[in-house]
Image (spheres, rainbow, N blue to C red):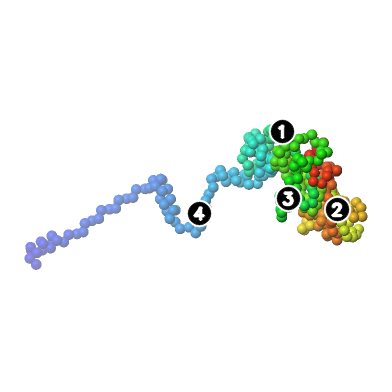
Amino acid sequence: MTAGAQRMTRATLKLPPREAPAPRARPLTSRARRAQHGRNASVAPSAVAPRAVAPAAAVATAAAHSGNPRLSKRMSELGLCSRREADEWIENGWVSVDGVVTTALGTRVPPDARIEVDPAARRHQGTQVTILLNKPIGYVSGQAEDGYQPASVLLRPENRWAEDRAPLTFKPSHLRGLAPAGRLDIDSTGLIVFTQDGRVARRLIGHDSEVEKEYLVRVEGTLSPEGMQRLQHGLELDGVKLKPARVSWQNEHQLRFVLREGRKRQIRRMCELVGLGVTGLKRVRTGSVVLGKLPTGKWRYLRADEKF
């Protein structure tokens, strides 16, 4: 190889350029580390779907209130009024809890809460009426059913008993919110109570009511001494043992029942269990209030001197 060729070869043989050293990574700031962690978490696979978490305040409130009764129920338990009345009083701003007026329905309160009622509610309660009706056969106690009318349709001014001694003048408002405090079968007759007063309703039909109700029951069939004993304290209905009853003969065809509970068609079912058929049933007393001479289909007001 000539010298010129050697020079040319040396001129074309160039070493590859040395790579510049990679710049040293700068340490991430705390903000950048948090952002990167968030991006990684957003794409990380997960076998369990994430749960929605309620705000801490809402969780604490729910936990605190979960076992507490509603305000209306608590007022009923304290005997202040019925739940229906309580809802009305709450909406009207007549109820305060621990010194704060409460108007929200469904509010829950601890059992030791201090509940106060505005005098306006008491005045309103004092204007409420209770009506006694001698229900005829063929009317149902509550809402219309199976084509039969409710007994409340009889509560018209023209059906008021002429001998009613209560010093009250009938007003249409007396029928507003009036509800039966107990049932009386369609094929039974006698005393049925309608009231606007939640205290009366609770006393007569509350779960802890002990008010006596007396009935005259016309029967057919033969009742043995053992059957009479079973009627008095040895029967159960629907798997529930009945409270003791006072049962005695009124005459050879009629029994007298005094009960402290009111199961559906209770007396008729009790009689069936001891081999008797009921041909007539009439309620003649509720608590201390008697049907008396009130004619069938007529009504009168409960007087101020009468208590159940």
Which residue was labeled with disc 3?
149
Which residue was labeled with disc 2?
217
SS at mark 1 in the image: helix
- The amino acid beneath tag 1 is Arg
Checking the image for residue 50, the label placed there is: 4
> Residue 244 location in percent, x, y?
84, 52
Q: Nearer the viewer, residue 245 or 30?
A: 245
> Residue 146 location in percent, x, y?
71, 55
**Would you say residue 273 is visible in this rendering?**
yes
Residue at figure coordinates x 14%, y 61% from the top left: 12
Question: Compared to 238, does 152 lie above or below?
Answer: above
Mark 1 or mark 2, earlier in chain: 1
**Label 1 to label 4: alpha-carbon separation:** 55 Å
**Label 3 to label 1: alpha-carbon separation:** 33 Å
Mark 4 or mark 3, earlier in chain: 4
Q: Residue furthest top?
A: 119
